[in-house]
Amino acid sequence: MKINYTLRRSRKRRKTISLNISEANEIIISAPYFVPVREINNFVQEKREWIDKTIKKQAHDRCVHKEKEYVSGEHFYYLGKNYPVEVFFEPTEKQGILFRNQQFYLNAPENKEIRKNCFILWYKQKALEHIRGRVDFFCRQLNLRPSVARISSARKRWGSCSPGNRLAFSFRLIMMPPEIIDYVIVHELMHIKEKNHSRRFWKLVEAAMPQYKTCQFNLKKYSENILF
């Protein structure tokens, strides 16, 4: 099947053919003035697989990063998995989120901010339950005692440990897979022993969680997709 593209010729310094795909999925070919069209077409055909993958990825990224409207059919993360939401409004029923049978149910009026706040309140409650439970577990395992562990609304910091060993974790962490949540908890707990990111600190993290580098990598990957 023929691939449509926009060709831009250059009489100047360009010596090779290059390909770029715009945000609107327009394929743009830049080529020297003297290169025949047949050679350009062959070049494009050779890049067909890369073109298809890139266009699909850009479409996926636009979908994922699109601002939420809090309407039926959208998906929201919880413990690393993406679940659909069904939105309705029953004034006589309790307003808020119910998670059941692998799906979110949101009872709220047609107001974006109210619906968003319902999700935030639900996530905060679930984060409080899950994260505090895991903090207690690792405290027993590692024989560490933070002064407090609270849930925050931080957007850019998944967790923190103050000089007084007060821990804080963003409620958005509850959207991550359980093993990543555990990594962030262990990371912050180890700051009770070592307040920096020295070699000794990472040795402590590795001793408690040998697979931490995989979790660290996946944390960055998931963080691009689940924030709202």
Image: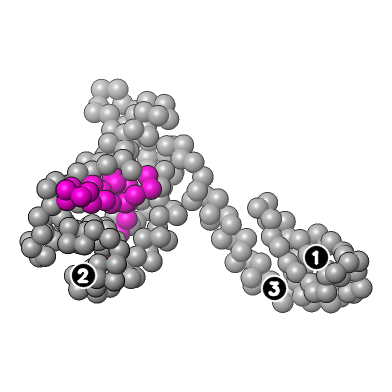
Image side of residue 112 versus residue 147, left or right = right
Question: What's the magenta region?
Answer: 155-179
Residue 174 visible at all:
no
Pointer 1 residue: 30
Image vertical order of residue 100 relative to residue 203, above or below: above
Image vertical order of residue 38 relative to residue 145, above or below: below
Circle nearer the N terminus (3, 1): 1
- Residue 206 in the image: x percent, y percent? 24, 72
Spatial separation of the CA atoms under disc 1 and disc 2: 51 Å
- Residue 45 in the image: x percent, y percent? 74, 74
Q: Residue at x 20, y 73 (%)?
A: 207
Pointer 3 residue: 47
Q: Amino acid at mark 2?
A: Leu
Look at discs 3 and 1 and give the one toward the viewer: 1
SS for callout 3: loop
Residue 203 visible at all:
yes
Task: Between residue 133 and residue 155, name the one nearer to us.
Answer: 155
Image side of residue 95 versus residue 34, left or right = left
Q: Residue at x 37, y 25 (%)?
A: 109
- Residue 117 in the image: x percent, y percent? 34, 32
Circle nearer the N terminus (1, 2): 1
Marking on residue 204? 2
Q: Residue at x 38, y 48 (%)?
A: 156
Spatial separation of the CA atoms under disc 2 and disc 3: 46 Å
